[in-house]
Image: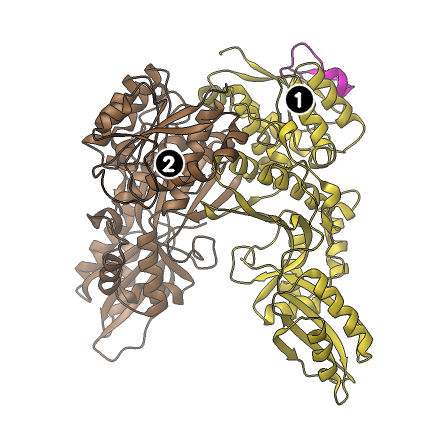
Chain colours: A yellow, B brown
Amino acid sequence: MTEPLRLGIAGLGTVGIGVVKIIRRHAALLEARTGRPVVITAVSARDATKDRGVSLKDYAWETDPVALATRDDVDVFVELMGGHEGPAKLATEAALAAGKDVVTANKALLAIHGQALAEQAEANGRVIRFEAAVAGGIPVIKSLTESLAGNEITRVMGVMNGTCNYILTQMEATGRGYNALFEECGQLGYLEADPLLDVGGIDAGHKLALLASIAFGTKPAFDDVKLEGIQRIAIEDIRHAADMGYRIKLLGVAQRSARGLEQRMTPCLVPADSPLGQLEGGTNMVVIEGDAIDQVVLRGPGAGEGPTASAVMGDVLDIARGLRIATFGQPATTLSEEPAAQTGLPAPYYVRMALQDKPGALAKVAAALGDAGVSIHRMRQYDHATTVAPVLIVTHKCTSTMLEQALEALAATGVVEGAPVALRIEEL
Amino acid sequence: MTEPLRLGIAGLGTVGIGVVKIIRRHAALLEARTGRPVVITAVSARDATKDRGVSLKDYAWETDPVALATRDDVDVFVELMGGHEGPAKLATEAALAAGKDVVTANKALLAIHGQALAEQAEANGRVIRFEAAVAGGIPVIKSLTESLAGNEITRVMGVMNGTCNYILTQMEATGRGYNALFEECGQLGYLEADPLLDVGGIDAGHKLALLASIAFGTKPAFDDVKLEGIQRIAIEDIRHAADMGYRIKLLGVAQRSARGLEQRMTPCLVPADSPLGQLEGGTNMVVIEGDAIDQVVLRGPGAGEGPTASAVMGDVLDIARGLRIATFGQPATTLSEEPAAQTGLPAPYYVRMALQDKPGALAKVAAALGDAGVSIHRMRQYDHATTVAPVLIVTHKCTSTMLEQALEALAATGVVEGAPVALRIEEL
C-alpha cells in the first residue's frame, strides 16, 4: 500500500495541534516508517479564526465534526474533542458508519460507550484505537493488548491523573494543605473545567475501566469502578504515611478473582521505596502484572501536547502500516460481563483516629478491632498537647467489609472523636 | 483467518520450555485473543531424552533444527538456541528461505547478522521478530517501532544486563568487592558460559546495537558499540559515587547527533534519585527519549523463563493476528549507514585519583585539567592516613577527547599515583 493515509482531525486544542505539528515536521520520517505518506485532508474546530500557532491553510475546514467524519477524502477520523455525549459521540458513530477507522484520545466516550462503539466498528470492519486516552504518551494499551497477550493478567495498577499526583507530592514537599494546592492548580490551568474529573478521580476512573477491559477481556464497566477522590486527604495523613514508610497516591487498581472484577480508583498507601511510591509530580505510571511476565512498570508523561500527540500518532501509524486489532484486544462481542466484586481482596489498611486521652481508651479500640476480626500489625500513638491523642494503626490484611465493621465498632466505643480516616495499603 | 498458527520451536532450555508451558496453559485465552488456535507442531533440542518437566509427546521431534525450520507443518520458526553462528544462523536462514516467519530471542545473531537476515526475510515477504532479545519481558522493541513511531528518537538508554546490575547493587549494599560477587554469580548460575558476555558488556552491547537500529533507522552496527565491562569498578568508586548522589550502572546509551551515531555500553554514574539510579538487582530498565514524548521509562524482568517466554509469545501472537512489521521497523534496504561518532557528546565526568600529599600537588592537578580545557564542578579530598590522598573530581561537561587529554596531563604532573579512574556521568 503506497497511497496516502488521509486524516480528518476534529478538535484543535493542545493535542490536535500537537498532531498537526508532528505530521508537518516528520512527513519524510513517517513515510519511511510506514511506507506511505500520512497526510491531513481536513480539520474541524469551533473557532476557525483563532491563531493556533501553526498554518492550517492546506486543510479543508469543516465546522461540523460529523461532516468532517464522513468526508470521502478522510480514511481515519481523529477525534480530539472530548466529552462522552454530543458532537464527539455523534461524529464517531458517523465515521464508523461511513467506513472510517477512528483514533481517539477520549477516555470518557470509550469508558461509557466503548462497548457499543466497538461493536459498531467491528460490524463495519473498522478499528477504534485509543492509546492517547490512557496515561498520555505511555504505551500501555499496546503493551497490554499486544506485547503481553501471552499472559493471563493478574493485576493492573496506575497513577493516571497528573494533577492529583502533583497535589499529593506537593503537599508532602511543601507542607501546604489540599485546599491551597487545589486553588494553585486551578490558577496554573492544571484542572479540567469540572475539577471533580481530576480530584474526584473520575477522569482516572475512566482510564481504569478501559485498562480493566483490555486486561481481562471484559466489557468496559465504568459504573462498577469504586471512585474516591483526594479531597479528604489531610496533610497529617501524608506525614504519618511517610513516617511509616509509605506515600499516598490516587491509585487505580483492577484485579480479577473468584470474587469477581474489582475496579478501584481511590487514595491508597504504597511503599515509599517502590516505583509507585517514588513517582513525583505530574508523571504517570502503570504497573502491569501477569502470570508469565511477573511485573512490568511503564512510566512517562500522562498529558501535554507532545506526549498525547505521540500516542495518537502511534495509533495512526499502526493503521497506516495495516496493523489492525480489535478495540479491546479481542472482538467486542466476545467480551464477558464480569460481576463486580462486592468486597475487594484482603489488604492491610492504614487507620488514623483521634483517641480520647483517658484510661482504658486504647484497650477499647483494640477490643473493637479484635471483635471485628481485624488484627493490628503496627500501632503508634503520637505525642499530644490536647486531650485527644492521634493514633495510627496499620492492620494485618482484612477485607473492606471487615474494615467497615471495625470502623463502626470504633465509633461505638465512645472514645474515638469524629470519624477515623481509613486508607487501603496496596502491596507491590 | 481461523486455521491454526503452527510453531516449530528450536531450543528447549528455560525460554523454550516457558513458551511450551504458556501455549499449553493458555490455549483458550490465546485463541480468544487472536481468533485462531496457536499450536506447536514440532520441537528440536540436543537431548531428546532429558526430562524437562513438561510433556512434549504431542510434538514431532527433530534432531536437526534446519529440518525443523523447513517442515511443511511449521508456519513460524521459533529460534531459542542462541549463538550467532552455527545451527541458529543456519536454521534461521533455512526457515526464511522456506517461507517461514521467525521469532527469536537471539540478540547476538541479530546484532551481527541482522541486516542480512532482515533483507532475506523481506525478499521472501517474511518477518523476523525479536522482542525477547532485548531486555527480556519489557516491551521495548514494540514501543520503539510502533507506539513511538511518531517521534524522532533522540536518545535510548538502558540497563540491560541483570547480572551486572546485581553485582553493582550488591557491592553497594554489602560492601563486598567485585571479585567475590563475580564468583558468587558463577555459583548461582547467573553467568553465561563465557562470563565476558555478561560482565564485559558484550551481551548488553548486542542489545544496544539492536535498539540503536530501530531507534534511528540505521543498520545494526555492533562493531561500533564502545564496550567497557564492570570488572574495573572498585568498591571505593561505588561508595564515592553514592556520597555525591550517584549510582554506578552498566549503562547503554545510543544517541545520534551531528557527530554521527554514538553507541556506548560502559559503566556510568547516574543520579541516585533517578529511575535508573533507583534500579536494584537483576531488573532491567530502558529509557526512551523522543521529540514529542519527552521521556518514557520501561522497567521489568530482563531474563527468566516466564518473562522471556512472554516476549516470545507477544511476537508469536502478533503474527497470529496478522500484525506484520519490518524487522527493524522499516524495510531493511532503507536503513542508513550512519558513521560512528568519533567522540561522544559532551558530558560531566567523575574522576578519582590518588594524590601525593605534598604542597602544591592539588594546584598541579587543577592546572593540568585547566590546560586541557576541563573545568572542575565539584572536588573532594578525603581524610587519609597514608601519604596518598583520595581525591574526587566531578567535571563540568567536556568531550571524551578532552577528558583523555586531561588524564594524560594528570599522569604527567608526577603527583598522581597510578592511573585515575574516570567514569562518564549520564544526565537524565
Question: With B307 as the anchor, is B421 left or right in this view?
Answer: left
Q: Nearer the viewer, residue B361 or A420?
A: A420
The answer to whether residue B28 is magenta is no
Q: Position of residue A416 (x, y in %)?
A: 79, 77
Q: Is there any visible trace of residue A420 in the rendered image? A: no
Give me the disc on residue A121. Answer: 1
Above/below status of A395 relative to B202: below
Q: Is residue B182 above or below residue B213?
A: below
- Tell me which chain the residue with mark 2 is part of: B
Q: Which residues are magenta?
A: A57-75
Q: Which mark is residue B79?
A: none
Q: Residue at x 68, y 83 (%)?
A: A383
Viewer-side residue, A372 vs A199: A372
Does residue A68 appear anywhere in the picture?
Answer: yes
Disc 2: which residue = B211
Q: The residue tagged with tag 1: helix, strand or loop?
A: helix
B194 relative to A334, above or below: below
Q: Tag 2: Cα neighbours inside 10 Å, few (<14), some, or many (≥20)?
A: many
Image quadrant assignment for residue B55: top left
Q: Residue at x 21, y 56 (%)?
A: B409
Q: Tell me the element at label 2.
A: helix
Q: Amino acid at mark 2?
A: Leu
Q: How far, Cα to Cα, is label 1 from label 2? A: 35 Å
What amino acid type should be assigned to the residue bearing mark 1? Ala
- Locate residue B249, reporting x and y percent: 35, 54
Q: Are marks 1 and 2 in contact (CB under 8 Å)?
A: no
In the picture, residue B105 is in which quadrant? Answer: top left
B275 horizontally vs A229: left or right? left
